[in-house]
Amino acid sequence: MATYKEIKGTQIEVLASDPSNPVEGQVWYNSTSNVLKGQAATTVGAWATGGSLNTGRRSMAGAGASSSSALGFGGWLGPPPNTMLDLTEKYNGTSWTEVNDMNNARRSMGGAGTQTSALAFGGNQDGPPTDSIFTESWNGTNWTEVNDMNTARQQMGDAGADNTSALAYGGAAFPTMYANTESWNGTNWTEVNDLNTARYGLSGFGIITSALAFGGETPPNNYKAITESWNGTNWTEVNDLSFNRSFAGAAGADNTSGLVFGGYDHTTDVRTNKVELWNGTNWTEQADLSDPVGAFIQNAGAGTATSAIAFGGEGPSNQMKTQTEEWTGAGASVTRTFTDS
């Protein structure tokens, strides 16, 4: 039998701690824990339970780069008592920590960016409820009011890399639905080309030059599986979701790769735990969320197709959810411990 050195051309490393950035195929012996380990890639995606939010709520926005670095903000305790929230929480892969509040409490807003550089825009405000044009920028510590959107609306799709670059599309200021798309350059919002289908409750992910919009609804309770791809200039209809849904969570880097999870279909009063993966051409069903929290899970992408996070939402009988689930997709790098069994 060939030895490891004969196969790989090197001895197995002996290290006091695991390497910080191991590569696929790397093998080492951890002399502190006395175990043999190796780096591999996952073959299928799976969800795992994460730390709970401090405040359970629905219709919040989110931002983040991965399942271990996310931001959740705003949301709604209702009904009852129909309370809009300005709360902000950040996630470190283990637990959520409350940080500085938003300036304006609201729900169903758009969100984009990362845990240290995010944008919150639009939504629905308290007292009496009204649709918002407010935009706030997050610098990792505080929220600052910046220039408003051109069109007040809620329940829109969103995309963006950070607080200097974001996209808002669709949404509604009831009873009016919008196909409008606006692009944020760090200072101002500019109207650009519209979606092909006006709708609200849609989801999305990506950046301002490469985004995806999917799902949503039009009155009365007309649920959509429509998917549209944005190339930085125009929206193009592409292949539909496997089934109709609105108010779903999403995560993805651009219009070639992403994830949709949860959602709602008022026509059947079904809150779904179904998950679909987008590969740039088609949607494919993946492992389900463990709980059909479904409706009004966080809007705005938090993560990628291989490392995403789902949090909050509304369960049956209007329970406000605190749960968090972390997604590790196929092809993600993972450390394995070798045993003799």
Image: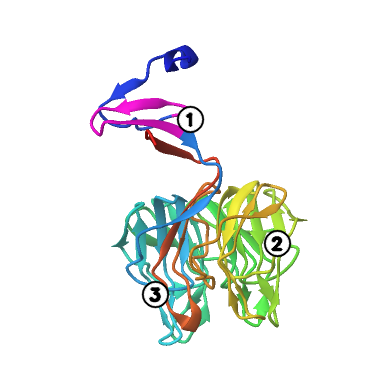
Query: Tag 2 or tag 3, which sits nearer the N-term?
Result: 3
Residue 242: which numbered mark, if any?
A: 2
Q: Looking at the picture, which amino acid does disc 2 mark?
A: Ser
**How many angstroms separate mark 3 from mark 1 (CA)?**
43 Å
- The local crowd at label 2, few if under 14, some if 14 to 19, many if 20 or more residues have their Cα within 10 Å, is some
Task: Give the quadrant of residue 244.
Answer: bottom right
Up/down of 153 relative to 206, above or below: below
In depth, the one of 104 and 257 nearer the eye is: 257
Q: Secondary structure at mark 3?
A: loop
Circle 3/circle 1 CB separation < 8 Å: no
Specify start and end residues of the magenta stretch as a single range: 23-39
Circle 1/circle 2 CB separation < 8 Å: no
Instruction: Where is residue 70? Give x, y as percent.
Output: 41, 55
Q: Looking at the picture, which amino acid does disc 3 mark?
A: Leu
Q: Secondary structure at mark 2?
A: loop
Query: Tag 2 or tag 1, which sits nearer the N-term?
Result: 1
**How many angstroms separate mark 3 from mark 2 (CA)?**
33 Å
Confirm whether the magenta stretch covers residue 32.
Answer: yes
The residue that label 1 is drawn on is: 24
Residue positioned 65% across, 46% down in the render = 256
Horizontal side of residue 335 vs 271, given as left or right: left
Confirm whether the magenta stretch covers residue 29.
Answer: yes
Q: Is residue 167 visible?
A: no
**How many angstroms separate mark 1 from mark 2 (CA)?**
33 Å
Q: Secondary structure at mark 1?
A: loop
In depth, the one of 36 and 127 nearer the eye is: 36
Instruction: Where is residue 247? Give x, y as percent.
Output: 58, 70
Instruction: Where is residue 246? Give x, y as percent.
Output: 62, 70
Up/down of 215 relative to 114, above or below: below
